[in-house]
């Protein structure tokens, strides 16, 4: 366990992540203002004016409070989307690698099809068919993210399959599902944790990109970093650099934290570096 | 080798068919294209007349059949928005997209690989920390933020580079940096990890113990083996660079496919979306094929039956 | 950070001056590229900006919204179902082809061919036949009286018959030949459209030699190009950028009230609080339009209280005053209707379709909260949003939308948006309508079949009074279009959202 927090990068990464999670949990306590409270007369106040440490946005809402509350949404989106793609990807990747043959062919070609589909088409189709909502945005992100998990799991399973302990389990008459669940899954867990951590960072960035393109289903009164960033770009050069800058910094910081810690995890869990 | 390539090419056809079909289904789900094609107050009779003239009144399965049949012959129909062949409109924008993707990738490799090697060779020193911090930062900046900042600094304040558009080498610089930074960071990290692993491996240790010097060891052995994951990433990224350049294209008004497809999707221009998905799928499959074949040259252990 | 940027900007502007100044050339940046060069096969402003410079309409829209005879010099109603049009003589297309009655007839026939409809064909569904009466005289016969005939003539652009017959419509759509002030030179899709002055233009040679249209989707990039002299006119300047654009010394913001109104449609068909007209009036009183306009729109907007605006035929000032912002009155009305404690409803808004639309919707939600009404806002990407609106499947109880009246006539707003289809055997209700008022329907149906313009005005005035009492929408404001214009260009924007380069000159 100690390997997981060794070295300065791990400590810094973990500290950022801890701060992020704590902020998300305690945002109502630490926020100076109600994040949805508008004050049109005080819109676009620069940082430091009248109790607004980071200034106000285009509707006069306190940016600091919105960033603090926004951490909840980023956390929610990143974890749920990664969970969905993890479950999908692990299942398909495991089956693909373990069963092999035509099943493997079909599933891996499915992955290729998925990768060649413009992400936007998928997003728009889901919005049009199911409506724009937070749930559907998470769903979309989750569905698009499965391929990388599936590929990693499949690769690991392909090499594990040939090992003695799996053959032994076979010989002892363990059912396939049992082998996959009890013997294969624990052995790919390390690689999965690494990918999952890094994917969380990707999801936060992709949500921001969706907001930029006006395709995010996050309701406007709920503060989201991506939405704040997208909203502020209109005034970035002129009249309100702070509106987009601080959420941008928040995103970068958290993604940085996740990546820092993810790197440490990768090294700690990589069998070759032990 | 030849049998392998043939088999892979057949699979490419399967993937392209799959993508074409999925795109068709998604478009059907995405709603009625007539909504966006005609003025909002168009009367029902006008709408139906228009629908019939576009062949959209036929049963869905018939539309699918006709679409596949024509697509095989390279005919994706006429764009609903512009009275021009859909495939032509997509292909017309490919040079700009390929140029941007290629430049972005080149930038990423030129920056990323040396940075990774330097970091690995200076493991535990401040230089590694510096290089890797930069790489992590590069991976954590949303591309549109970076793009707008590049415009602010180089276009608005220093005024040394054009802000938007296409045509000259100068126009390429800012979009290339915006698009390539993320990949450069990813490549830097992968190269570092790869080189580190190889340096620890037995044969490099052997080479070293035989008196080969640091630099030669790196180039002759470690880098070559570390190249495999890097090539994988390059393959994956080229796909995303092509279709994922939407934001870069938007910010710098770059006339590429990504932005064009975004508009086509949001206008429900079915023929254009279908043509672009097929082009993407084929392109991506070929890139993957090339990546797999390049393993052959990079890693003597890899053999394709 | 803010101040230094301004200083840095002005220094660079001073030192570099007009880096890009090329005499005789004007670059116009819009959000998107044109989709076609066929002037009658699109309904998009960005495309119209290009084609309006290549082609001539039969009637031209004046800056005040009136009509100027253009390729039609005289239009005479023969009876309720027949118009006689005198055509301008001596007009030639850029390829030398002459414009005459045969060509005009070809143009109408092209739009009424039901096998190959164009995207403006729906304007002409009531035209039954066009006959040539002389070398420069045609008659347009309609199956039913078409009250908006004259104003619709601004939307039919003359295209050359021989050129299209010889080269085909597809070739024409990317290699246009017109009779307008500029001739087509080059179109590199998503890069630029280049037009050159047509010196033999019948109305006189244009002042600027070359016009370039460039699509620049990102608004901050458009602004950056403008203040560095890369482009000369940009569309949809954001209100927040106005002070700095004007302060750059390189460009100014130029505004004009638009033909477009922005409002929130209330879905009044269901059971619920919005069914009560007192509640709807309360909502209208609860929204502080002036503050929204002053802050979010930077002062660029005109508050209003009816579906029309002053450019439109049928507008009556007294019936269009904005509902005063009066939270007390709003509370009273809500209490009268039995909602003293307020209520909850859902509201939809697009994002980026209209100037700061989402911010406006958010501000409205904030203001309604002050009188105890909780509106839950759902923002959607435009293409799905408009699909739901048209299919009447929008999941919210209210939705924000804008309407740019292309005819400058009450009919195109009132009938399109408020006609409820209650007349037995009459036209079906319009997609936008959630108001079902038999009296209003009768007025609107009569007005559209009445050619006597004075009588039509009376009918619309009666209709406006009904609409005001029923308050089927939350009336917000008439949009003001904001353009960024380089100081080296002398040009004034127009209410119909079009950029007519003939009006522009280099200073």
Image (cartoon, helix red, strand yellow):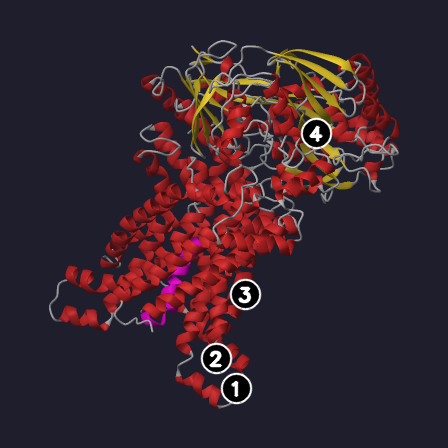
Q: Are marks 1 and 3 on the same chain?
A: yes
Magenta stretch holds residue B188: no
Kindly identify which chain the residue marked by label 4 belongs to. Answer: C
Q: Which mark is residue C149?
A: none
Image x and y of residue C417, in percent: 75, 30
Q: What residue does disc 2 label?
A: A183
**Quadrant assignment, res A151:** bottom left
Magenta stretch holds residue A270: yes
Question: Where C245 sits versus B213, above or below?
Answer: above
Q: What residue does disc 1 label?
A: A174
Kindly identify which chain the residue marked by label 1 belongs to. Answer: A
Q: Which mark is residue C263?
A: 4
**Quadrant assignment, res C228:** top left
User: Could you tell me if the residues under marks 2 and 1 are in contact, i.e. CB atoms within 8 Å?
Assistant: yes
Q: What residue does disc 3 label?
A: A88
Task: From the image, state whether disc 2 or disc 4 is nearer to you.
Answer: 4
Kindly identify which chain the residue marked by label 3 belongs to. Answer: A
Image x and y of residue A11, in percent: 39, 58
- Say which quadrant the C terminus of chain C sits in: top left
Residue at mark 4 to residue at mark 3: CA–CA distance:
44 Å
């Amino acid at each position: 366990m100690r390997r997981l927090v060794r070295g300065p990068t791990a400590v810094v990464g973990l500290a950022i992540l801890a701060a992020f999670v704590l902020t998300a949990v305690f945002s109502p306590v630490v926020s100076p203002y109600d994040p949805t409270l508008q004050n049109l007369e005080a819109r676009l106040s620069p940082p430091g004016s009248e109790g607004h440490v980071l200034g106000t946005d285009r509707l006069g809402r306190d940016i600091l409070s919105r960033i603090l509350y926004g951490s909840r949404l980023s956390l929610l989106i990143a974890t749920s989307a990664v969970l969905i793609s993890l479950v999908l990807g692990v299942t398909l990747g495991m089956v693909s690698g373990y069963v092999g043959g035509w099943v493997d062919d079909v599933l891996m070609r499915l992955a290729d099809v998925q990768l060649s589909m413009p992400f936007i088409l998928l997003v728009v189709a889901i919005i049009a068919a199911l409506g724009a909502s937070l749930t559907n945005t998470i769903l979309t992100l989750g569905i698009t993210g499965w391929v990388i998990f599936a590929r990693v799991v499949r690769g690991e399973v392909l090499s594990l399959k040939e090992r003695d302990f799996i053959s032994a389990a076979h010989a002892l008459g363990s059912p396939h599902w049992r082998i996959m669940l009890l013997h294969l899954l624990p052995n790919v867990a390390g690689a999965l944790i690494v990918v999952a951590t890094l994917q969380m960072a990707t999801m936060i960035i992709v949500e921001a990109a969706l907001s930029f393109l006006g395709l995010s289903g996050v309701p406007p009164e709920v503060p989201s970093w991506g939405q704040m960033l997208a909203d502020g770009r209109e005034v970035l050069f002129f009249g309100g650099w702070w509106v987009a800058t601080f959420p941008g910094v928040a995103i970068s910081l958290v993604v940085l934290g996740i990546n820092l810690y993810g790197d440490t995890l990768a090294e700690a869990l990589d069998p070759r570096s032990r | 080798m030849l049998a392998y390539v043939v088999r892979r090419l057949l699979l490419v056809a399967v993937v392209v068919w799959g993508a074409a079909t999925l795109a068709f289904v998604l478009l059907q789900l995405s709603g009625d294209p007539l909504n966006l094609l005609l003025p909002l107050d168009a009367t029902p009779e006008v709408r139906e007349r228009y629908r019939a003239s576009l062949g959209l009144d036929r049963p869905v399965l018939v539309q699918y059949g006709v679409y596949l049949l024509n697509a095989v012959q390279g005919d994706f129909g006429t764009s609903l928005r512009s009275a021009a062949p859909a495939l032509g409109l997509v292909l017309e924008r490919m040079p700009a997209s390929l140029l941007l993707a290629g430049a972005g990738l080149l930038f990423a490799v030129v920056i990323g690989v040396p940075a990774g090697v330097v970091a690995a060779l200076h493991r535990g020193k401040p230089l590694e920390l510096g290089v890797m911090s930069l790489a992590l930062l590069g991976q954590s900046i949303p591309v549109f933020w970076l793009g707008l900042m590049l415009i602010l600094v180089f276009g608005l304040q220093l005024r040394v580079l054009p802000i938007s558009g296409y045509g000259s080498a100068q126009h390429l610089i800012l979009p290339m940096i915006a698009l390539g930074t993320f990949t450069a960071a990813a490549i830097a990290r992968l190269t570092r990890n790869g080189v580190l692993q190889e340096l620890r491996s037995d044969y490099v240790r052997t080479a070293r113990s035989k008196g080969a010097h640091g630099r030669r060891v790196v180039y002759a052995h470690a880098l070559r083996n570390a190249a495999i994951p890097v090539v994988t990433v390059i393959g994956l990224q080229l796909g995303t660079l092509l279709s994922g350049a939407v934001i870069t294209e938007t910010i710098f008004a770059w006339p590429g496919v990504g932005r064009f497809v975004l508009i086509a999707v949001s206008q429900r221009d079915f023929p254009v979306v279908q043509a672009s998905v097929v082009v993407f799928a084929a392109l991506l499959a070929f890139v993957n094929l090339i990546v797999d074949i390049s393993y052959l040259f990079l890693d003597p252990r890899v053999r394709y039956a | 950070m803010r101040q230094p940027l301004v200083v840095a900007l002005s220094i660079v502007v001073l030192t570099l001056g007009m880096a890009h100044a090329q005499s005789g050339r004007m670059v116009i940046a819009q959000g998107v590229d044109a989709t076609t060069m066929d002037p009658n096969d699109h309904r998009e402003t960005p495309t119209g900006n290009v084609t309006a410079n290549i082609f001539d309409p039969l009637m031209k829209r004046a800056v005040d919204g009136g009509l100027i005879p253009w390729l039609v010099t005289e239009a005479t109603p023969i009876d309720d179902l027949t118009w006689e049009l005198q055509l301008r003589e001596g007009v030639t297309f850029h390829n030398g082809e002459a414009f005459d009655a045969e060509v005009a007839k070809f143009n109408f026939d092209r739009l009424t061919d039901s096998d190959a409809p164009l995207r403006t064909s729906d304007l002409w569904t009531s035209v039954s036949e066009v006959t040539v009466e002389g070398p420069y005289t045609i008659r347009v016969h309609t199956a039913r009286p078409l009250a908006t005939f004259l104003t619709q003539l601004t939307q039919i652009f003359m295209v050359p018959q021989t050129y299209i017959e010889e080269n085909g419509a597809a070739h024409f759509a990317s290699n246009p030949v017109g009779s307008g002030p500029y001739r087509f030179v080059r179109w590199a899709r998503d890069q630029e459209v280049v037009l050159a002055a047509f010196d033999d233009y019948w109305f006189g040679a244009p002042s600027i030699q070359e016009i370039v249209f460039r699509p620049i989707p990102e608004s901050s990039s458009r602004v950056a190009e403008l203040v560095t002299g890369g482009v000369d006119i940009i569309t949809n300047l954001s209100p927040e950028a106005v002070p700095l654009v004007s302060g750059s010394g390189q460009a100014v913001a130029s505004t004009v009230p638009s033909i477009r109104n922005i409002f929130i449609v209330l879905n009044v068909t269901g059971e619920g609080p919005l069914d009560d007209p007192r509640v709807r009036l309360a909502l209208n009183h609860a929204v502080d339009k002036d503050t929204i306009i002053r802050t979010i729109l930077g002062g660029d907007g005109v508050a209003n209280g009816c579906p029309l605006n002053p450019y439109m035929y049928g507008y009556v000032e007294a019936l269009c005053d904005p509902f005063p912002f009066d939270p007390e009155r709003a509370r009273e009305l809500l209490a009268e209707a039995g909602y003293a404690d307020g209520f909850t409803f859902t509201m939809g808004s697009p994002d980026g379709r209209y100037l700061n639309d989402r911010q406006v919707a958010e501000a409205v939600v904030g203001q309604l909260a002050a009188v105890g009404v909780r509106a839950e806002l759902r923002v959607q990407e435009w293409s799905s949003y408009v699909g739901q609106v048209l299919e009447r499947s929008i999941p919210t109880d209210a939705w924000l939308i804008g309407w740019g009246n292309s005819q400058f006539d009450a009919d195109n707003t009132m009938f399109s948006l408020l006609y409820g289809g209650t007349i037995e055997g009459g036209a079906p209700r319009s997609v936008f309508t959630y108001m079902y008022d038999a009296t209003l329907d009768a007025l609107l149906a009569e007005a559209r079949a009445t050619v006597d313009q004075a009588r039509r005005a009376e009918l619309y005035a009666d209709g406006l009074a009904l609409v005001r009492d029923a308050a089927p929408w939350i009336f917000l404001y008439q949009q003001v279009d904001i353009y960024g214009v380089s100081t080296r260009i002398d040009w004034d924007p127009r209410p119909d959202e079009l950029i007519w380069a003939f009006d522009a000159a280099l200073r």
